[in-house]
Image (cartoon, rainbow, N blue to C red):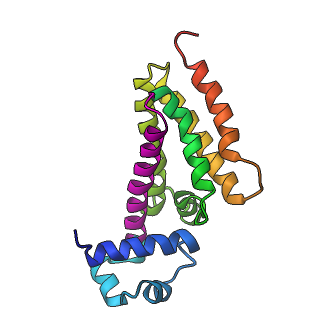
Amino acid sequence: MRQTKRDELVEKATAIFYRNGFQATGMDRLVAETGISKTSIYKHFETKDDLIVATLKSRDAFLRGWLFGRMAELTSSPREQLIAMFDALHEWFNEPDFHGCMFAKASSEYQDPEHPINREATDHVARISAQLAEIAEKAGLNHPSELARQLALLKEGAVVLATMGRGGSPALDAKAVATKLVEEADPDK
């Protein structure tokens, strides 16, 4: 299917914002790097903030699709998928184009919790937690929502440490903790 100009802009802007940040990326840079005129950008988005929200929505759909798809590829067991999330993260952290978490960047650059960009970043983490809770429930684990929030916290911490690039294997370290949390949530223990 042919990509619309709006979709092309969102795709290109997502890559630019992910690489450079939001506030450091001005409209002139977007025009230069996307090859799309300011007039065309503003035809599709009233403000730069609207474009940022669209890129976050796009990145959310892509990232959750990739992450949960990769978890399912690694194992069919819902219980093991919760642990496999950290193997998938380890793969992502070792990609040459890994530049951290776009949502953490968004929430740090737009700290007002009522700002639409901050809300979209926060909603991303809530959607991750909700999907993890569904998997934990399928696995028959105790307190699936609580476990999901704990696993999401481990995931976000691993992403931050990987972004800082201080060495080690934050995803695998988080995996060890996640394994213990999943074991503790087993109703047969």
Describe residue 180's horizontal placement relative to residue 69 as left or right.
right
Compared to residue 24, the image places residue 171 above or below, namely above
Residue placed furthest toward the top: 188
State the image quarter where residue 182 is shown: top right
Compared to residue 86, the image places residue 23 above or below, namely below
Q: Position of residue 58 (x, y in %)?
A: 38, 61
Describe residue 64's horizontal placement relative to residue 96 as left or right.
left
Q: Is residue 76 in the magenta section? A: yes
Kindly identify the residue that appears in the image at 44 percent across and 19 percent down.
140
Compared to residue 91, the image places residue 185 above or below, namely above
Q: Does residue 89 appear in this view? A: yes
Describe residue 187's horizontal placement relative to residue 130 as left or right.
right
Magenta-tinted stretch: 50-77
Kindly identify the residue that appears in the image at 42 percent across and 75 percent down.
12
Q: Position of residue 172 (x, y in %)?
A: 67, 41
**Closer to the camera, 170 or 121?**
170
Q: Is residue 156 in the magenta section? A: no
Q: Position of residue 166 (x, y in %)?
A: 77, 56
> Dividing the image into 4 quarters, which one contains the C terminus?
top right
Kindly identify the residue that appears in the image at 48 percent across and 20 percent down.
141
